[in-house]
Structures are given as C-alpha cells and as structure tokens.
Image: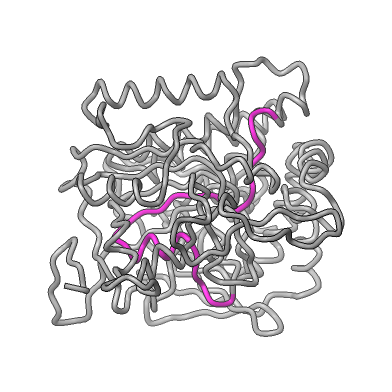
Amino acid sequence: MVFDRLTRPRRPAVEATPVDVLIRAADAGDTYLSWRWLDDVAMPYAHRLDTLRLEAALSVLDRSIITPIDAESPEDAVIRAMRTGAFADVRAERALAEMLTESVLPSQLRKQIGDRMRRGTPIRVRLTPSPRLARVPWELLCVGKRQRLIEIAQIVYDPPSSVHVERSCMPRNWEQVRDLPALFVIDPKLPARARAHGLTRTLDPGAEAAFKAMVDKHIAQGRALRRDKIVPVGGSVFRESLGKALRETPRSRFFYLGHVSSRPDEPGSAALHLSDTASSFGLMEPLRRIGENGEPAPAHADDHRPLGALDLLLGTLGSRQAKGKAGHEIWPMPSRVAIIACEGGADYRSVETFGLVIAIVNSGAELVTTTRWTLPTDHAFQVAVPNMPKDVRPTSTLATTVDAAHSGADPIGVLQRWQCRQLERWQQSGGLEVTPLVWASLTHTVAPERTAMGERRSPGLDRSV
C-alpha cells in the first residue's frame, strides 16, 4: 500500500480552504469510479474497479453489519455483527478496511490524496456512490499503515445533480436561522399493531431520561420551545402534527431518532415510523399483520401507516381533497436535519437515487446527517457485553453528539473530529463501546443552493408559489 511513511500534517495556524475532490461511482456490470480535483478541473480521471476483489470485500462488510443474511432473523443479525463481525475486533476491522481500500480507492487517487496531504492542503471528499458502494464506510479507508481517510479529509455525500433541478424549496443559510428553535421527535409512540413488525421502543428508561434532559437543556438555552405542539421524547407524533410544527413555527433544524424502514429495490419506499394508523391519508401501504399461513391478514383500521419519502415529496397531491398540497408545503424542512435511525440514508442504494434524504433536501434542507446501515440499540450492547456499565450507551452517544454538532457553526468538522477520537479509542482498546459499527455509520448529504448561471434566487424560495 502507498504512503506507508506519511506523517500527520501539521495543522496551519489559519485553516486554509479545503480542496474538493468530486468522486462519482456508477454500476454498469462492473463498477466505475470517476473523479476530478477542483484545483485541477481540466484533468478528469476514471477507473474500473476489480469486480471480484470488490465483491469479496463487500461480502465481508455485509457479514459485519446488522442486515439479515439469507434466512437470518433480525435478532441473529445483531448477535452475528456484534460478536463475530469485523467491527467486533480491531484486527479484523483493519483487515476489512484494507480490503475495501484496495477495492474502491484507486492507487492513483490515493497518491493524489497523499501529495496534497504532504503539502498540508485540507481535503474534502464529495462523493456520489453507486448502489454497490452505498454502504462502504469511506471514513475507514486506509491512507498508509497508520492513517484513515477520516483523519485527513472531510467526507460528504453529493446528491445527484438532478436533485438541484427544479428543486421545490431552497435552503436558508444557517446564519439566518441558527437562533430559531429546533424540533425534536425522539422515539415516538407507535400504534400497538406495529409491534408485530418488530417496531418497538428504541430507548430504554435510562436513555429516555438522558434525551429528556438533552431537550430540557435546549429549552433552557432558548434553542427549543417549552410549549411545542409535539411531545419531543416518547410522545404520540402524527404526520399532521409534525406538519403543523414545521409550518407554523420557523425552525433552525429537525432531529429525529426512531425507526426507519426501506426496500433498496424500491425507490421512495424509505419511511419514518410515527404514530399514524391506516386512517391517515398517505402513499405508503399500511403494515398488515402476517397470519399463521404467512400471508398478510385482512386490512385493519389500526394498522400502522409509515410516513414515506413519497409522502414528503408528493404530499396530498394524490388525494381526493379539493386542492392537494405538495410535500414541501406540508412538511417544509429546516436548514439542518438529522435522521438517526436504521439506515436512514438508503437513498443511494437504489439505481434511481431517491429516499428520505433526497425528499428532505427537496423540501429545504441543506445538510442531512443520517446513517448508512442499521445501528444496534443500546440494549444490544448490554446483551453482547454483559459487564458493560449500564450508563454506557454507544448509540445514544452517537445521537447526542450529532445533536450537539448540528447546533453549532461547523457540524461536519465537529463530527469528523469526534470520529477521529473514537477511532483512536477503538485502536487503543478494541472495546465494543467504541466500535466503528456505530460511529462509522454516519453520512452527511450536503446540498447548498445552486443556481444556473445568470439566475438569482432567494433562500427559502418556494418554487410552487
């Protein structure tokens, strides 16, 4: 591997503007990678990835995350990932990182990164992955024997250019909205029939108390409303009440912690799970119970209806109402959104890139932080490591860290530095409480306003007006 003797560059007294490298991936039989440095825009590069090597690395990755394999149950998938997966052992994780590096990061690109790193040039990787590469933790890729990509570069996702065309609502600049209240939806109460689909509470009593304290702190600092229309932790939250809270009170950001589901082969199927039943209008099919014969039971009015990406995009335009409204009119999104849930960023796993992230961007968000794979619950850590202290809650810590970062001026930089500290702790201790299964799951989709040359638009402009 190249750059074995590279040392960490000395941080300059004044931070320089980072140089962007745009990386685009496409699956067309094989997987192709193209990239272009914005300090050398006249020189594009392209590389065909070795399919056999890539499939071998992705197979190890699949066995290391919480996604059921074959006939595996969700519970067995958690146990397998946390006890025998690569993210349960330091040496196995390093071996996986090296496999992924050799599979997805061409040597020419690694050399270019190293050259700029030696010059002390800050780097930002702007990535649009293909479905095959959507769950690759680029932060863990190796740059030499001692460093990972997260230690020398910020890594963000670029939504496809088509997302910026006819975007329904432009994001507002953070400086304009930072003093507005945030909106929190944390572990919302689900309909009773949702339990049949494994949708139970995500927080134990200790974690619930910690999140209530977090929200109370924001209220005391004037960053959240004491008399908000939504009970922020563990309350019933319906799509209608969420829409009212977003429309009637201008917000700086939106923070969601709960369940998300999706089907990668069906763009737009990604959905938040709130308190709605089948009686609420929506474009997602209600979740029906499965009978003893394995077939869906007859529809019931109390079946749970998720709030899907198609809802956030199309709203009630398909309803029988006299005048339907588009999704961004019903659920306008603030500048920053965090979705800490089960693979909230599944958009990039579909050939047609569309899911919750893209729908939220279309509705006004500039930054969407979410996760690229399913996270273990805090309770799962207690089961996997019985002697782990009860107050150690890795997934809750991830969520509260994202919340704190989204409150400040440089959320991506703050989270990058936190991930570097977690990486150092992981390499030193190998403790499961700092496993990359949690902190390496984060992704940031960044979508600032873009306009065609000669066109001027105002932040927050609603194109439907």
**Relative to 110, residue 377 above or below:** above
Q: Vertical placement of 338 versus 44: above or below?
A: above
Q: In the rendered picture of this protein, how many numbered marks are placed on residues?
A: 0
Residue beneath the point at 34% across and 46% down: 241
Locate residue 396, reporting x and y percent: 54, 30
Residue 71, placed above or below residue 225: below
Query: Where residue 377 sits in the image (x, y, percent)?
Result: 64, 34
Residue 414 in which image quadrant: top left
Q: Percent x, y for residue 274? A: 49, 46
User: In the picture shown, does residue 96 fall above or below 322?
Assistant: above
Q: Nearer the viewer, residue 417 or 281?
A: 281
Q: Residue at x 43, y 68 (%)?
A: 159
Q: Quadrant of the N terminus?
A: bottom right
Residue 225 is at least partly visible in this image: yes
Left or right of 283, for residue 384? right
Instruction: Identify the image quadrant of the C terminus.
Output: bottom left
Instruction: Identify the residue shown where x is 60% and y is 60%.
Output: 262
Image: magenta residue range? 351-379
User: At x 51% / y 24%, what residue is drawn?
Assistant: 208
Residue 3 visible within the image: no
Q: Nearer the viewer, residue 333 or 396?
A: 333
In the image, is residue 364 part of the stretch drawn in magenta? yes
Who is closer to the viewer here, 185 or 197?
197
How far across and how far down the image is residue 296, in percent? 74, 61
The image's colouring method is one colour
Q: Residue lying furthest bottom in this view?
A: 28
Taking the magenta stretch, the answer to whether it contains residue 446 is no
